[in-house]
Amino acid sequence: MDGKTLERVAQRVVDIGGAGERRGFELERLLRSAGWSDVPEYDGSPRIPWLTDALADRADNRPDIERFLCRVCDPLEYDGGMPVAEAFRNELNSILEFERVVITYSGGRPVLGELTDGSEQPVYGAPPEVEQRLRALLSDQQVIDLLIDRIAQCRAAQAAGAYLLAVFGIGSFIEGLLFSALKEQFPELVTAGFRGQDGRKVPASRAGLALLIDTAHEKRLIELDARNFIHPVRDFRNYIHPRQQLEHDFTPNADTVNMCWVPVNAVLNDLEESIAGRGQRAVL
């Protein structure tokens, strides 16, 4: 993003003299809540230049900038909830307009989309810099390589117009990501198993996507809204059976795939925020 854009964003976030004014320690906390690692310590200097510099230092790190922009529009940030967050989002979008990006809500969660030429409807795609982000989240290199390959195949299917295969691939990627994150963050799940809806133990090898989604929310790796709007992507995978596809007259198109990328981005953002938070608490 242009330096002027970052400065305007910083001015709006700090909001000196406004109802939502943020103090220095609150700015530092905001960056941590956005899942940033190595957050700069607020040094008592003027807040707008300090935040502008912090953002400029990450200007080439799209995931960090994206998580920050989404976090400042997240209803979780405000005592007034969605009405306050949405009012802030509208003002922020007027700043971001010239960068051809926009913050929208999907399932109650803020997500960043790109505005293409000749259209004011945001377009969503695979997470940016997904390889680097997966390497920061997971330690199993074999799993990382497999997940990167799944994303590449989803992109190839989407580009070729094989939208049904792209939808299946996206669901598969979410399943692999959640299982790997849960296994690494909570290794006891591998030995003790997952707890099903009926309270019975489910072996890790038999944990399906629905159970992975619910467990990730229960363990606070993903937020409630993210959990809720991953489930439709999971449901789409049932159409791998031609009979069900015929019964429900399901014919995915480019918009369907576009919609399915939204929860992927939200889940990845949530995992980065929650796992970074777990790491910070462990250090403390």
Image (tube, grey):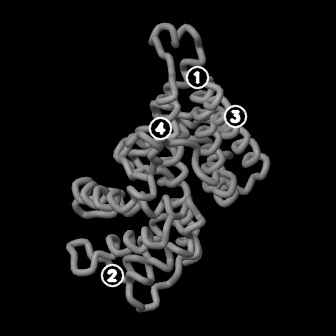
What secondary structure is found at the residue carrying circle 1? helix
Viewer-side label of 3, 2: 3
What secondary structure is found at the residue carrying circle 3? helix
Return the residue at label 4.
Answer: 230
| Mark 3 vs 1, N-terminal side | 3
Question: Is residue 209 depicted above or below 224 in this figure?
Answer: above
Instruction: Tell me the distance, in whole angstroms, between the alpha carbons under discs 1 and 2.
Output: 48 Å
| Mark 1 touches mark 2? (CB < 8 Å) | no
Return the residue at label 3.
Answer: 153
| Mark 4 vs 1, N-terminal side | 1
Q: Residues within 10 Å of mark 1 (few under 14, many from 20)?
A: many
| Mark 3 vs 2, N-terminal side | 2
| 257 relative position to 145: left or right | left
- Locate residue 48: give its quadrant: bottom left
| Mark 2 touches mark 4? (CB < 8 Å) | no
Q: Position of residue 183 (x, y in %)?
A: 65, 49
Instruction: Tell me the distance, in whole angstroms, between the alpha carbons under discs 4 and 1.
Output: 17 Å
Viewer-side label of 2, 4: 2
Q: Amino acid at mark 3?
A: Gln
Q: Position of residue 282 (x, y in %)?
A: 57, 71
Q: Residues within 10 Å of mark 3 (few under 14, many from 20)?
A: some
Residue at 62% across / 23% down in the picture? 162
| Mark 1 vs 2, N-terminal side | 2
What secondary structure is found at the residue carrying circle 4? helix
Q: Which mark is residue 23?
A: 2
Instruction: Tell me the distance, in whole angstroms, between the alpha carbons under discs 4 and 3.
Output: 20 Å
| Mark 2 vs 4, N-terminal side | 2
Residue 258 in sight from this viewpoint: yes
Question: Is residue 119 depicted above or below 4 in this figure?
Answer: above
Q: Which mark is residue 164?
A: 1
Q: Amino acid at mark 1?
A: Leu
